[in-house]
Image (cartoon, rainbow, N blue to C red):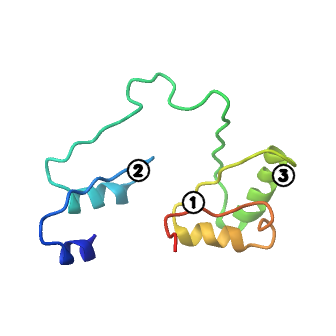
Amino acid sequence: MNKILEVVKVPPQFLLFSATIPEWVKEVAWKYLNKKYEFIDLCKDLTNKTSHTVNHLAMNVLPHNRIQTLVDVLQCYQGMHGKCIVFCETKVEANSVILNEKVKNMVEVLHGDIA
């Protein structure tokens, strides 16, 4: 965003969309958006914000066990034809998963660094 601000002649309108609101998203909003920015929760009035057909798993795993645990979970819940979405906090983490020999044939990576 700094590069955009350096080039444009008229102050741009920034719209920030995020499926989650981690601390870094709040920091970006505070830094770049107008201080009177509006937060809109598209799911606020829903009693159940997730699909009834989606199972969510959260596991507390030691860092050195993450890939093997991911392999086990994928094999158990994804099976031969199932689908599974694994969220990583950073592109580096997502890329490290896709490059790991144990899971590279089971996953694809998708992140905002589209060339």
The answer to which image quadrant residue 23 occupies is bottom left
The residue labelled by disc 2 is 18
Spatial CA distance of label 3 from label 2 is 29 Å
Q: Secondary structure at mark 2?
A: loop
- Mark in front: 3 vs 2: 2
How crowded pointer 3 is (Cα within 10 Å; few <14, some 14-19, many 20+) is rated as some
Tell me which label, 1 or 3, sits earlier in the chain.
3
- Mark in front: 1 vs 2: 2
Residue displayed at 61% across by 66% down? 94
Locate the N terminus and report the quarter of the image it occupies: bottom left
Residue displayed at 73% across by 64% down? 67
Q: Secondary structure at mark 1?
A: loop
Residue displayed at 66% across by 35% down? 54
User: Could you say where residue 110 lies in the image, as x and y percent from the top left?
Assistant: 59, 62
Q: Which mark is residue 88?
A: 1
Q: Which mark is residue 75?
A: 3
Spatial CA distance of label 1 from label 2 is 14 Å
How crowded pointer 2 is (Cα within 10 Å; few <14, some 14-19, many 20+) is rated as few
Label 3 is placed on what type of residue?
Answer: Gln
